[in-house]
Image (tube, grey):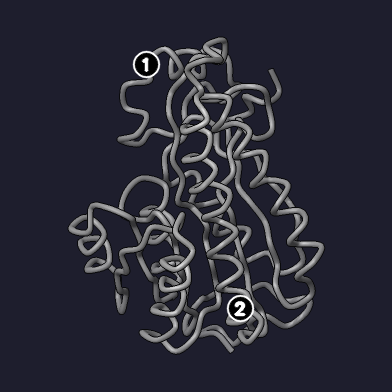
Amino acid sequence: MDSRGSAIGEPGTVATSLTGKVALVTGSSSGIGAAIARALARDGAVVVVNSSSSPEAGESIAAELPGATYVRADISDEEQAKYLVDRSVEQHGRLDLLVNNAATTVVIPHDDLAGATPEIWRRIFEVNVLGTWQVTVAAVPHLRSSGEGCIVNTSSWAGERPGGSSIPYAVSKAGVSHMTRLLAATLGPEIRVNAVAPGLVDTPWTKSWESVRAHVQTTAPLRRSATPEDVAEVVMGLVRSSYVTGEVVMVDGGLHLR
């Protein structure tokens, strides 16, 4: 029961608190991931913060959040992905929620086919697709044990529409979107799997993308780019929605309508 007397996780009820739940958020030392980690912690979850670099930033985020810990791991490496999940469970005794947020990209004009080298394709896919897969595979036994496991993947507007920072990135995120649907069909009823697909989000990563930002501000119905908190809000909605699985929710201010 939660603090207001409502059951959590029972059919037909709406979860109102994540107290007692453990959440792992990959790529959460800044930007969207950090906003998601903070939102989960505000709702009562104990969060495991992760990054492959910038451990000081990751430890700083963890220090903000009650009971949170930080684990440095590169999810593109299978052994490190397993270590990340194992260490999370060792530290907190369980795993209930997984947010696969870690990703990478390289900005390449879509008509620069030679610029999208096989090496760039491999690196982007190793992180965005294989990394998401490897962490998920390691986490599934623990999420099943939870009794109400939940996975939310971070895909992208570029995975649903022909755009994005590069063709390799867009294709990798299309893979994440379809992986989400396939996993939802496979892992139910014990584990729900959904994804968010943000458009342009104002983060340190996109700070210099002024021409893209101007396009979004003049084209999207909501006339602005997203904040990390906008994305975190939708993630929290998917975490709380006990009868939703297999969905990829666009968080792009309506840009996909144009």
Residue 203, percent from left and from top: 35, 36
Assign the N terminus to one quadrant of the image.
bottom right
Cα distance in 3D space between marks 1 and 2: 40 Å
Left or right: where 254 falls relative to 201: right
Other residues around mark 1 within 10 Å, as few (<14) / some (14–19) / many (≥20): few
Which is nearer the N-term, disc 1 or disc 2? 2
Assign the C terminus to one quadrant of the image.
top right
Residue 107, percent from left and from top: 43, 23
Q: Amino acid at mark 1?
A: Glu
Residue 99, percent from left and from top: 52, 61
Residue 143, percent from left and from top: 61, 78
- Point 58% across, 14% down: residue: 219
Who is closer to the viewer here, 178 or 157? 178
Q: How many marks?
A: 2
Disc 1 to disc 2: CB gap under 8 Å: no
Q: Is residue 87 above or below residue 242?
A: below
* Label 1: which secondary element: helix
Residue at the front extreme of this rendering:
118
Q: Is residue 239 above or below residue 139?
A: above
Q: Quadrant of residue 75?
A: bottom left
- Point 62% across, 75% down: residue: 140
Q: Is residue 122 above or below residue 210?
A: below
- Point 64% across, 28% down: residue: 254
Q: Which residue is mark 2?
A: 143
Q: Which mark is residue 174?
A: none
Q: Which residue is mark 1?
A: 210
Other residues around mark 2 within 10 Å, as few (<14) / some (14–19) / many (≥20): many
* Label 2: which secondary element: helix
Residue at the left extreme of this rendering:
56
Who is closer to the viewer here, 240 or 113? 113
Q: Amino acid at mark 2?
A: Leu
- Point 66% across, 81% down: residue: 144
